[in-house]
Amino acid sequence: MRARGVGFAVLAVALLAVPVLLSDSYFVHVMIVALIFAMLASGLDLVMGYCGQFSFGQAAFYGIGAYTSALLALKAGWPFWAALPAAATVLVKGSRFMRMERVVAALTGEAQGGH
């Protein structure tokens, strides 16, 4: 079991060193996108594979966060490192509505300025 942990540590260090060692921005972009999709796939594997539940929630939150971050960066002119925590804040605020009943969620959205 210890050798497996050392192997993961070596792999993590190697993956962190790739953007520093390679100057090709396209390859780094492809690698980042692949790792993001790997995180999404491992989360879906956990929910659907081990628990047997069908979930669109992860994809919805991923899409909302990406859309919010992109709008803030492109339309509002925010830098990426400011748009990322703002998108996370939107997701945390929006996740509170997931546990509410429909009428309560509608009233809560109306109270916060929603239409």
Image (tube, helix red, strand yellow):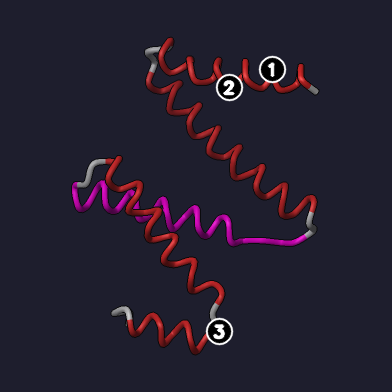
Which residue matches tag 3? 101
In the rendering, which numbered label is found on residue 64?
none
Q: Earlier in the sequence, mark 3 or mark 2?
A: 2
Q: CA distance from mark 1 to mark 2?
A: 10 Å
Nearer to me, 14 or 56: 14
User: Measured from the top left, where is residue 96 in percent x and y?
Assistant: 48, 70
Q: Earlier in the sequence, mark 1 or mark 3?
A: 1
**Is residue 114 placed above or below 21 in the rendered structure?**
below
Query: Would you say residue 76 sits in the magenta stretch?
Result: yes
Dot 1 falls on a residue whose secondary structure is helix
Quarter holding the C terminus is bottom left
Circles 3 and 2 in contact, beta carbons < 8 Å:
no
The residue sitting at the left extreme is: 77
Which residue occupies 37% across, 13% down? 23
Dot 2 falls on a residue whose secondary structure is helix
Q: CA distance from mark 1 to mark 3?
A: 47 Å
Inspect the image, locate mark 1, and give the three-letter code of the amino acid beneath it: Val
The residue sitting at the front extreme is: 2
In the rendering, which numbered label is found on residue 6?
1
Magenta residues span 53-77
In the rendering, which numbered label is found on residue 12?
2
Dot 3 falls on a residue whose secondary structure is loop
User: Measured from the top left, where is residue 72 in percent x and y?
Assistant: 27, 52
Q: Earlier in the sequence, mark 1 or mark 2?
A: 1
**Dot 3, how many residues are within 10 Å of its Cα: few (below 14), some (14-19), or many (20+)?**
few
Inspect the image, locate mark 2, and give the three-letter code of the amino acid beneath it: Ala
